[in-house]
Image: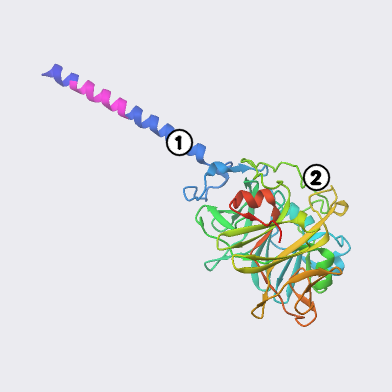
Amino acid sequence: MVAILKSRNRFVALVRVIVLAAIGWWGLQASSLLAKSLPPNASAWPNTDFARTSINLDEILSGGPPKDGILSIDEPVFVSTEEAAEWVDPQEPVIGVVEGEDARAYPLQILIYHEIVNDTVGGKPMAVTFCPLCNTSIVFDRRVNGQLLDFGTTGLLRKSDLVMYDRQTESWWQQFTGTAIVGEMNGTELVQIPSTIVAFKDFSERYPDGKVLSRKTGHFRPYGRNPYRGYDKIGNIPFLLQDPADDRLPAMERVIGVSKDGAHRLYLFSAFRKQPVINDLFKGIPVVVFSKEGTLSALDSGRIKDSRTVPSAAAFNRILNGKALSFEMRDGRIVDRETNTQWNLFGEAVEGRFKGRRLTPIQGGVHFAFAWLAFRPETEIYQGP
């Protein structure tokens, strides 16, 4: 009987060892899989819930800088257009944002080094963002479900596009879509606010009392110089784009896109020289795209003021007073054929019957073709009238 008990105890001990070894092995495998699924620098994000994500975390790559290695501007200082004219070239690109009577310009020579400005325009909290790698400038409302967020840079990229984070929940947000992709806010989408990339001269002439983001950011940067020299050259390869760029267009072709109910259409900047004003119909919406030559590229020469010029462009709904207008470029002026009213790049009537009226902007924006098509591959490309 004693021999039987000893044998039984040895068997139980052996089984226990095997079970513990199996648990340990599976634990190691699980830890290994978890480590593989975490994005770069995950240890810097103890408050981010990586279990809540709508993407494959393997798509996120380190862009080089660490968390907040590219510092956002959280206490922006503004100067008058007259003061800014001392250091901003008339043709230099700025992000123009207008909310009520409050008009502000954010020079790309500053945004190229900070990528995010947390600001309040016309009483509305906004995040003004610019991703140089995608040539993507988008402005968002910083309020989400009654909570005020402010944003910083993660130092990470997805599809070559800036991944932002909010400091309140440390959720990660895709700049291109304005959607939270990791963390507590996962799946939440920010509201986009209309903005326009224009030459500083166009902004200051239209809004002489407007405010311009100052170089007094609290940080020393070589504002006016382009650290991405030659990046926007046609034929270049996007930085850290894992998947092949959509071959329908050159990766660095500048485009303006419009979106409606999940459908998208692109208009090529290269077409504007022949067709500077485009009247179109998209998903039942009469669309007009205004363009104007003469804005410096922020991503060409080592000094922005020495860069080549590219068009500025903006898209609007053509309906005014319940009727669709049709537009054309006439003697260098944008006019509607119905009343000969003159319009500007902000969609505003500046002379004529409709003076003081404004067209409704259409959601979309100006980007490099590869970026738009990477996030919206089902997009149609405008082929002409």
| Residue 139 image-quadrant placement | bottom right
Return the mark for residue 360.
Answer: none
Mark 1, Cα crowd under 10 Å, few <14 / some 14-19 / many 20+, is few
Q: Secondary structure at mark 2?
A: loop
Q: Circle 2 sits on which residue? A: 230
Q: Is residue 346 above or below residue 338?
A: above
Quadrant containing the N terminus is: top left
Residue sitting nearer the eye, 274 or 291: 274
Q: Is residue 7 visible?
A: yes
Q: Which residues are magenta?
A: 8-19
| Residue 218 image-quadrant placement | bottom right
Query: What's the amino acid at mark 1?
Result: Ser
Query: What's the amino acid at mark 2?
Result: Gly
| Residue 13 image-quadrant placement | top left
Residue extending furthest toward the bottom = 353
Q: Is residue 115 visible?
A: no
Say which of marks 1 and 2 sits in front. Answer: 2
Residue 202, horizontal then vertical, whole percent: 82, 67
Quadrant containing the C terminus is: bottom right
Magenta: main secondary structure equals helix
Q: Residue at x 66, y 50 (%)?
A: 371
Q: Residue at x 89, y 63 (%)?
A: 86
Mark 2, Cα crowd under 10 Å, few <14 / some 14-19 / many 20+, is some
Residue 306, horizontal then vertical, whole percent: 88, 52
